[in-house]
Amino acid sequence: MQHLLLAMAAMFFQQTCAALGRALPAVIAPSIIADLNIGAVWIGIYFGVIAMSALVVQLGCGSFIVRYGALRVSQVALVMLCAGCALAALGTPLAFVLSAIIGGGGGAVSTPASSHLLSRCTTPRYLPLVFSIKQTAVPAGLLLAGLLGPPLAEWVGWRATMLAAAAVCVVLALLLQPLRERFDDDRVPTRAFRLSDFRTTLAAVLATRELRTLSYACLAFNGLQTVMTAYFVIYLTTIGFTPVAAGFLFSVAMAVAVPGRILWGWIGSSYVAPRLMMAGLAFGMAVSAALLAFGSAGWPVLLVGLVACALSATALSWHGLLLAETARASPEDMRGGVTGGVLSFGQVGAFVLPLLYSGLLDVTGSYGVGFVVCGLPALFVGVQLLRR
């Protein structure tokens, strides 16, 4: 039990930093937009580049996890996130592109690495609960970004805020070093990376109906989650919220995802089949996204907050269930790689849906249309999960 708790703590803080580093540019977007005089549509493009980088990294990370160990790969992910945040602080177009590529790759590999490590420390029955607890690190990171990002950006500037996040990531990478020998005892130093690993991982994911279904679900869910993360704060500022108030409401919504993930994981481990739980969450996130689309300056703050919390409890709370089902359905020696393969489909969603949202925003001038359209894939997946 002590071994499991230590592993969960290490992976929790690692993924908290990953979520913080990836979400911070969106949370302080009003400050960045005002300083650089750019349009809101560029936020979707930035997150699209992150998703493309993450897709490549997640498809090819399996060999590196086996060769160097999940903890070492986690440390490398944190260093990459540090570099990504520092590059964004430069504020040039090239720097933002490099930030998205490097930081996106670092954030992407953190989940396969943590799944590989934790799947060795617990039994299959409790994987949904353990993975759900671990995945509460994502809303925790988003909560910190929403609470600290906007006021810090107003106080010291958005560039210094990005540099502060970079410093946190590199410090945690150093703090994980004493745990390396304990948790990387399964590494295989002779394992080499090959370009064929991309094909092998993709073939393993597509070989079974169960993993294919999970991949499609990841695409729809992660795409909608990325749209919410990228555009929620800037959307609220268009209906009368100040950047600090919008960031606070974002944090409140993210806080709901913490107990939400644990609750869904506990129910999925004990009472309801994880697949049925994911179907319910799919319907919930599609409906919540549609409700958010009708938000206006006339809405009470409480009503906006309730809709945001409902969207957070669904679109940001499915990860533990999906990752546990993926680990259960994967070959034992390929859990990290197959998890990366399933998550790479999620990166396709994280690439396509924000770009689709940006295009709809540019054409229609409406933030609401994008929320409705980006919720439709989740609705389709929910129907498919129920049918199976």
Image (spheres, rainbow, N blue to C red):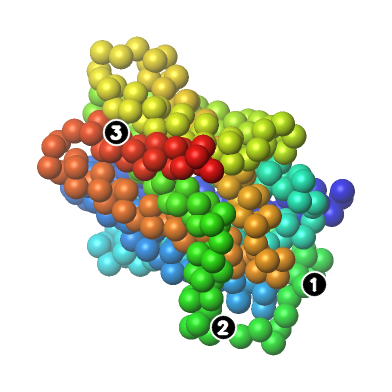
Task: Determine whether 61 is above or below 280 in the image.
Answer: below
Measuring 65% from the left and 38% from the top, which residue is drawn there? Answer: 273
Measuring 53% from the left and 51% from the top, which residue is drawn there? Answer: 214
* Image location of residue 282, percent across then percent down: 47, 36
Secondary structure of the residue carrying tag 3 is helix
Q: Nearer the viewer, residue 340 or 367?
A: 340
Q: Which residue matches tag 1?
A: 185
Which labelled disc corresponds to residue 193?
A: 2
Task: Determine whether 181 is above or below 371 in the image.
Answer: below
Q: Are marks 2 and 1 in contact (CB under 8 Å)?
A: no
* Image location of residue 152, percent across then percent down: 43, 39
Q: Earlier in the sequence, mark 3 or mark 1?
A: 1
Q: Quadrant of residue 347?
A: bottom left
How far apart are the two marked residues, 2 and 3, measured between alpha carbons?
Answer: 41 Å
How far apart are the two marked residues, 2 and 1, measured between alpha carbons?
Answer: 19 Å
Q: Which residue matches tag 3?
A: 372
Task: Determine whether 48 is above or below 206 in the image.
Answer: above
Q: Nearer the viewer, residue 132 or 106?
A: 132
Relative placement, left or right, of 205 versus 130 is left
Q: Quadrant of the C terminus?
A: top right
Q: Earlier in the sequence, mark 2 or mark 3?
A: 2
Which labelled disc corresponds to residue 203?
A: none
Q: How many marks?
A: 3
Q: Nearer the viewer, residue 383 or 370?
A: 383
* Image location of residue 318, percent across then percent down: 55, 40
Secondary structure of the residue carrying tag 1 is loop
Whether residue 274 is visible, yes or no, is: yes
Q: Residue furthest right?
A: 1
Amino acid bearing label 1 = Asp
Mark 2 residue crowding within 10 angstroms, few (<14) / some (14–19) / many (20+): some
Q: Are marks 2 and 3 in contact (CB under 8 Å)?
A: no
